[in-house]
Image (cartoon, rainbow, N blue to C red):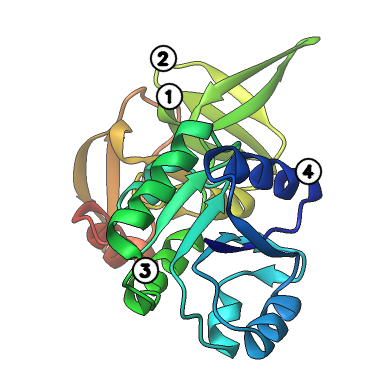
Amino acid sequence: MKILIIEDEFPAAKQLQKLILRYKPKANILNVIDSVEMAVNWFNTNASPDLIFMDIQLADGLSFDIFNHTKVMAPVIFTTAFDQYTLKAFKVNSVDYLLKPIEPNELQAAILKFEQQFAQDSAVDQVLLQHLMQSINKPIYKERFLLKIGQQLSFVPTTDIAYFFSTDGIVYIKTQEGKKHLLDQTLDQLNQELNPAFFFRINRKTIISIHAILKIHPYFNSRLILEVSPKPDFDLIVSRDRVGDFKNWLDGQTS
């Protein structure tokens, strides 16, 4: 079996070779390549291997760029540190994925899968590759916030936050339990870090969690006023220019 490894981390490449040869002692490791540019040059000047192990993040970009510059005629097993739940949906017949650090039994299963199903399948599924690229480029949102309470450090999970609000230029978190914490960030920064499926900026001074909203009432000048839990000591009003987007957000439409 002729195998090409595309991996930019030397220790990871060395460990991968060791695992491959442990399971397939007669495997021929053709080369270890650490960049998109070198990989393209290699494919343009060499016969296709039987199997490729390909890291997603290389020294000069994503390995998907290789497919934009040359034709890859061998099945690919991607190696990646990305979350396994994101990649689980892409474990189909065209290619497979190994999560770093690579487990020997996972490597063995991937090679066995290749031998059983892909030995006669020489082309990478371009549709699958496109879906994977979209998944990798999907934003990663904050799951918790670091807090300084006195001389101690603590954190609050995003799921425990009812809303963020700004007063005199200072931003605070209000938790579902009613606790208030100072946060060293701006609302503009938070608006980029929070999952838009669960948080919405209703006005210049407030970002609300969907889970905090109890009731929504019409308010004068075509605005909306919210009843939330815990109850704030100020009115939570959806500004007129955000009402349309707010209704779309409530309806599950986020961009």
| Residue 152 to residue 224: above or below | above
In the image, what residue occupies the spot 69% across and 70% down? Answer: 61
Name the residue nearer the viewer: 124 or 254.
124
Distance (Cα) linking label 3 and label 4: 29 Å
Q: Secondary structure at mark 4?
A: helix
Asked which secondary structure carries label 1, the reply is helix
Q: Which residue is mark 3?
A: 131
Whichever of callouts 1 and 3 sits on the residue coming sooner in the sequence is 3
Mark 4 and mark 2: span between their CA atoms? 47 Å
Q: Which badge, 2 or 1, comes first in the chain's sequence?
A: 1
Instruction: Identify which amino acid the numbered label 2 is placed on.
Output: Glu
Looking at the image, tell me whether mark 1 or mark 4 is earlier in sequence order. Answer: 4
- Mark 2 and 1 residues: CB-CB less than 8 Å, in contact? yes
Amino acid type, label 4: Pro
Q: What amino acid is at disc 3?
A: His
Is the C-beta separation of discs 3 and 4 under 8 Å? no
Label 1 sits on residue:
160
Q: Nearer the viewer, mark 3 or mark 4?
A: 4
Given this view, does label 1 or label 3 mark the residue nearer the observer?
Answer: 3
Secondary structure at badge 2 equals: loop
Label 1 neighbourhood size at 10 Å, few (<14), some (14-19), many (20+)?
Answer: some
Q: Is residue 234 left or right of residue 63?
A: left
